[in-house]
Amino acid sequence: MAVVRENGGRLVTHALGSCIGITIYDAAAGVGGLLHFMLPKPQKNAGPHKPYMYGSEAIPALFREAYQLGAKKERLVVCAAGAAMLLGKEGGLQVGKRNRTMMRQLFWKNDIVLAAEDTEGDRARTMSLDLATGEVSIRMHDGLKVLWPT
């Protein structure tokens, strides 16, 4: 996770398979952030605690840090990508689906609206946030697309 007050540069996360990437951007405050979380919530006896690994803890932390830098909830542009089913729809633990459900529940409870998303499917993604413009782009094996603005 990274949250910065910058007027240039780019935040990038790679290999969003079943993981989810979330970008937040407040143009007026010049605040941008990017989170890459792997699992919906910690399990008991999971080993050393890594809060940014879990959506249940990392998503609130992303927003808290942005607010501390001057971002305002009503101005935030929020985008998400990932939650792919790389191992097939029927098998496995369906981590991507569970991650997306966790994200959506937290957003619903906190009145957060997604400006754009590119989730599910069966392809890994690279997600980036341009800190000068707020543009969010997604790269997959077949090319690049702008997720926001649309």
Image: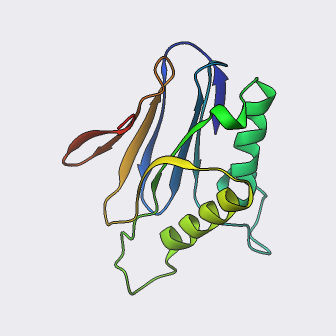
Between 108 and 147, the one lying in front of the other is 108
Q: Residue furthest top?
A: 7
The answer to whether 25 appears left or right of 15 in the picture is right
Q: Position of residue 131 (x, y in %)?
A: 51, 21
Res. 54 image quadrant: bottom right
- The x and y percentages for residue 21 are 52, 48
Does residue 113 appear in the picture of this structure? yes
Left or right: residue 60 versus residue 130 is right
State the quadrant of the C terminus. top left
Instruction: Give me the residue at 70% from left, 41% from top.
Output: 62
Q: Is residue 49 left or right of residue 76?
A: right
Is the residue 9 above or below the residue 104 in the image? above
Q: Residue at x 37, y 81 (%)?
A: 89
Give the residue at x 46% y 82%.
92
Is residue 54 visible in the rendered image? The answer is no
Residue placed farthest to the bottom in the image? 90
Closer to the camera in the image, 11 or 75: 75
Furthest residue in direction left, as rendered: 142
To which quarter of the image does residue 40 belong? Answer: bottom right
Tell me the quarter of the image containing the N terminus: top right
Question: x, y percentage for residue 134?
Answer: 48, 26
